[in-house]
Amino acid sequence: MNFEEHDIGLPITVLEELDQFKKGNDTKNFEAREFTRLLDKLAKDKSLQDWIPLNGKTRGSFKVVMEAGSGESALDANVIFGEKKNDHRILNAALRLKEEHPDRKVILVSKDINLRMKAKSIGLPAEDYETGKIKNVDSLRKGKIEIEKIDSELINHLYEDGTLAPKEVLKSKKPQPNQYFILKSDKNSVLAYYNSMEQTIEKVDKRPVSGIKPKNAEQTFAIHAIMNPEVKLVTIQGVAGTGKTLLTLAGALEQRREYKQIYLARPIVPLSNKDIGYLPGDIKSKLNPYMEPLWDNLKFIQNQYKETDKEFKAITEMVNKEKLLITPLAYIRGRSLSNIFFIVDEAQNLTPHEIKTIITRAGENTKIVFTGDVHQIDTPYLDSQSNGLSYLIDRVQDHPLYAHITLEKGERSELANLANELL
């Protein structure tokens, strides 16, 4: 529906590939079934070999395009690339369309960069699917602003009173909701944020959560967003070792009495093209290799206490009684999650639609925190501009229920920082 006045030729190979994905409970399985239903609804009693209007006569049409038969086309991708595979059948369908409509421009649209490269190599224009892409990753909200040359008396007032009028420190436009600030004078500095509900600049205090102390200003801001009861949606962006998952899990455990359960989830990116079903054991055994980083962070938090401490025992009890639960994202579709603290790790490996699906599950008193690094994509059809985390940060930045912070300083170890900076 996003192609407006352009006509869409759908290769028959795409329908065959969708047929392979129709069974299962993952997002791609639901989407495959939904797309097939949509196609059937649009076609009604018409032949898919004819051009069928998508959304009225002023918009584009679609049809299913068959692969060019042997000898029908001057170019055959199977011959050119020396192998019969679905990508080459899709190329042949595009070439057939080009020959059938010499007066029109035929463009191959695909999220598969290798397919686009092959198309261009045989003289076929190719483009990425741009819908849902943000223009510039570098322009994404960082969540904090550093302001210098503030009157030291204003900073002293903020320490004493806890609040300031925004106009006293911000000469420009109105700040974004839950925007964080580092305010500096020649003599002192203070951490603060903009409370859009009260329309005031408020002091942010450093506070430990579940035995974890913030090591820099950004971590302090992240904890504040995680602990702020007025904020229901949080995104934390940063490279490996900045403490995204650790701080979020520690904040959730600190608030365990405020929520019925804590859910931890990560997108499952299959290894070596092997889906999770290839792994041995039940669902818990299959998930464990993917969820180990979450368990590592939980053990780190637990080890801040002695085994005899009530906090240590409380974490063990939460796991045993499934008050703290690691769950696959595919299992939340169709559910209503009320009174849940929901942590989604590695959110950059989700599509914008998957992010929307997760957020629409939220019921009363549910808080969702997405963490990830928009530059570290493990899913083949996503990039830094099209992944769900980038899309979310870009689209909801002005909402008072939302807070974001980018963690820039690695705190895992000096060795980890060395790798991030030099390798």
Image (tube, rainbow, N blue to C red):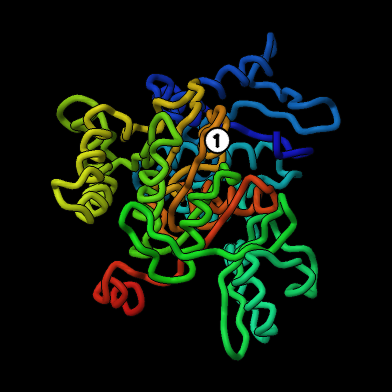
Q: In which quadrant is the N terminus drawn? A: top right
Under circle 1, the secondary element is: helix
Quadrant of the rendered image containing residue 136 = bottom right
The number of callouts visible is 1
Q: Is residue 173 in sight in this rendering?
A: yes
Q: Position of residue 4 (x, y in %)?
A: 76, 38
Q: In which quadrant is the C terminus drawn? A: bottom left
Could you tell me the amino acid type at mark 1?
Ile
Taking the spot 16% from the left edge, 52% from the top edge, the residue there is 306
Q: In this view, does 301 lie above or below 416?
A: above
Residue designated by label 1: 359
- Residue 363 or residue 224, whichever sits in front: 224
Residue with the most extreme right position = 58
Residue with the most extreme front position = 160
Taking the spot 46% from the left edge, 65% from the top edge, the residue there is 206
**For mark 1, does the 10 Å Cα neighbourhood hold few (<14), some (14 to 19), or many (20 or more) residues?**
some
Taking the spot 57% from the left edge, 42% from the top edge, the residue there is 232
Q: Is residue 124 in sight in this rendering?
A: no
- Residue 172 or residue 140, whichever sits in front: 172
